[in-house]
Image (cartoon, rainbow, N blue to C red):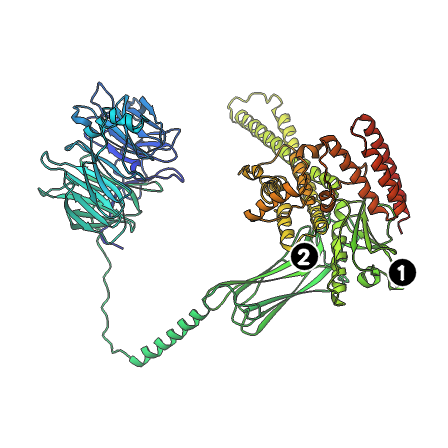
Amino acid sequence: MSLFKARDWWSTILGEKEEFDQGCLCVADVDNSGSGQDKVIVGSYKGYLRIFNPHPVKPGDEVQPEDLLLEVQLREPILQVEVGKFVSGTEGLHLAVLHCRKLCVYAVSGTQGNVEHGNQYQIKLMYEHNLQRTACNMTYGPFGGVKGRDLICIQSMDGMLMLFEQESYAFGRFLPGFLLPGPLAYSSRTDSFITVSSCQQVESYKYQVLAFATDADERQDTEQRKLSSGKRLVVDWVLNIGEQARDICVVSFNQGVSSVFVLGERNFFCLKDNGQIRFMKKLDYSPSCFIPYCSVQEGTINTLIANHSKMLNVYQDVTLKWATQLPCIPVSVKVANFQDLKGVIVTLSDDGHLQCSYLGTDPSLFQAPKVDSREINYEEMNAEMKELQKIIREATKTQDILPESEKQRDVTVTAEVSPDLDEESQAIDSEVKAGTVPSVTVKITIQSRVTAQKPNMAVCVQAPLAVTCDQFVFDDLEPDSSETVVVSVFLKENCSPSELEGTCMVSYNISTGIPRVSQCNFSLPLKLVCFPVQPSKSANHKLTIDTNKPPISFVTIFPDFVDPSEGDQANALGFQFLTGSKTTLLASKTSQRYRIQSDQLEDLWLVTKELIHRLEEHFKNQNCKDFACTFSGSIPLQEYFELIDQHFELRLNAEKYQELLSERAVQFRAIERRLLTRFKDKTPAPLQHLDTLLEGTFREVIALADAAEENQVNMFQAFAKLKSATHLVIMLISLWQKLSTDQTAILEATLLPLAEDTQELGWEETVDAAVSYLLRTCLSKSSKEQALTLSSQLSMPKDTSRLKKNITLFCDRLAKGGRLSLSTDSATHQAAVMSGGCATIPESDLEERTVVPGSTAMFASHEQTAKQKSKPGKKRKIMLFHFEVYRSSFQNACGHMKQMAFISAFIGIISSFSCYNSTMCRILRLFSLFCQEWLNCKDQSWN
């Protein structure tokens, strides 16, 4: 800390989260009071313009409200504020405000107040100029030697100097060799503009040369420029300073000599009028801003330079005269005169700390105690040095944050799930309507190789599952020690979970203070959420999984659900979920297929996942490496879309309840204010049934709150069902198209981007954006689709039609050979393959496709599509697509050649017609009913 601190005379904080820069501060007698007292003008990037008249305050007191003369919010960010004679016909001072695309000149005036509130100040717009180019900064002065008025020069971001003669635009000139804008200043003695180019050179341009140069607005060729009267813009003098400049200031405290001060990144320059260096000072710090001011000693100039170390240095030429500590890093500094106190230092930081201070010292009351002379024990110092070196070596060995390998982890976490359910259920506050909610015990063990400080453990399971205790705090673990905890997991909410997995995470610090995390995952048994029942023969939703191995008895792969007394003959198994729905699993006796059926689409997911997992584990134990599961049926998109609509409808209801609650709350508070006014009145007036209205409004608020809470519970359950159905669709698509692990991960990230659903960021808009991105990248048909830009703002859609259309188109592109990838090269290759390898169906055609009544959407495989050589018309293409749907349905239901020959012959006769009229539609509809009846008959005798 510096002994020489800036003495706070007046200070304040401007706004909240506002930003300021170098040109946002100005001091002048802007209201033309004639007292010689300066006002502080501050503009911010948020568009706030403030004018202060500081008065001294006692230490600890707050700034008085009357110190703020004016505060107004303009529409655009304020880049720079200046005060000068900018209005013709008067020599009064006016305020110039520079915006990005506008220059405004205001007159600031005050009205004498008759009450204790003081004077009133207001600004009046005198004139404004709309800029054709984006402004960077400006300077002003008596350009061309005019008397009694100031002209304005604005530098644009592309290097154009725009000059304004008060209310009118004069001309514009481009600076030669321009790249980036730099600071700009005007020298009245030489009538020239001085700037620093991107070539790190100080350049000077005469006003007369700018005036007679070729107009920047003219666009003439070389021959016309030779014939025109304009001259080439030539620089007056150039000085290479070898670094970028932060600011330029031209001062002339006497009529004979003027100086050009340039503040660089590491040097401070003082130049003569002709560009020669008068002196320079190498700085050992990074400066932030500066201001020269008049010196008491003749022939010298004082300069205030602030740096990023919160220091303000006072130089007399190149000699450091004073250094003072500031409370913040200033971006602009000025010198002003206030109430008989001249030379007040005004500083402004980038976050709005405005301070008026003066130089001084704070006396130090601390006295250092006398040091007792004692002899140095070199043996103790040597032993202490060795101990410290040992600690440093240990710290450098273990300074990495990530563990080196799995075997060498300092702390390991293992979770062991009990194979049996708890004899006495540990379920707490479960909302499941079943009689008994089971629970399963998870034993978690923490083993430490080193000293683990402040270990904390969290056990996480996905809702609607819950644990009896999810947070644990342990004492410090010693090396080679362990801790064991036991928790129970149960179903808490009244809906089935989408995942039966959990995570244990332990956070701790090692001896060097480095934080680390260890975690492990565990899987929960399926019988935690369901129990075995008699299988059902009929169901609304059915799936068929094909394998390349003979079917396995359920006694072998589901021993916890099948009675061993049934032997190897058990080929049907029923699962009753705790939430009330039933799922049936069937194994074919004649083919290598398994069927899963249920009345609810989302309940197929857990059973299908468990079946595939147990089959893979069974054949893995038998050292069979070529086992594979496939899916050749139809993707249940229509049923999936129904779940999407249900979830989206609940989201819309949540918005409606929120709006109604807000309206009723406003009404309730208004009635309360009316009643309070009546009760406070000395002469009470009749209530006029306000109490009845208050009670009715209160009941409405309570009823709406209960309805919103119930809708929130329903929306949570709908989202859980939607996640389960989404998991099922992802698995079916991966089996259908035989996606790799990376492609399946992309598919999961696309359709399951959110772990929780909120009103601000919902599942529908997030998935729609992800699917749209894939359709325009790796699944695009042409380069035109890749060039389309997606909206960067996610908002709740009005309906789900676009989402359902994109998902349908997404599945169709996959069926035609598209592959999922995140690289641009593969996306271009996929577009070429899809455009050349198969005829893609436009999105408009997808809207006209019909589906078999009571069935699901069916997409032709890539091999079937590639064989289509002809390119029929739009209606004929739709007709052939419908026939392919029915033929594929029959091919999945039965493999008999006679039936298939009949179907193929019928399709061949119908498809020979060249038109697709209403008669063909009726024939196709009758044929679809016949197909559905046949499929129902085949389902009843499937086994």
Q: Helix or strand or loop: what does disc 2 sit on?
A: strand
Cβ–Cβ under 8 Å for marks 2 and 1: no
**In the image, 114: left or right of 457?**
left
**Looking at the image, which residue is at 90% across and 45% down?**
898
Residue 113 percent location from the top left of the image: 29, 23
Q: How crowded is mark 2: few (under 14 residues within 10 Å), some or many (20 or more)?
A: some
Is residue 210 or residue 126 the one in the foreground?
210
Q: Which amino acid does label 1 sit on?
A: Gln
Is residue 502 or residue 123 the one in the foreground?
502
Q: Residues within 10 Å of mark 1 (few under 14, many from 20)?
A: few
Residue 818 position (above or below residue 502): above
Residue 768 percent location from the top left of the image: 62, 40
**Count of numbered badges drawn on the protein:** 2
Res. 739 visible in picture: yes
In the image, which is nearer the foreground, mark 2 or mark 1?
A: 1
Res. 345 visible in picture: no
Quadrant of the drawing holding the N terminus: bottom left
Q: Mark 1 points at which residue?
A: 569
Residue at the top extreme, as displayed: 89
Residue 770 percent location from the top left of the image: 60, 43
**Looking at the image, which residue is at 77% across and 53% down?**
607
Residue 670 picture quarter: top right
Q: Helix or strand or loop: what does disc 1 sit on?
A: helix
Residue 786 percent location from the top left of the image: 56, 40
Which label sits on residue 501?
A: 2
Q: Which amino acid does label 2 sit on?
A: Glu
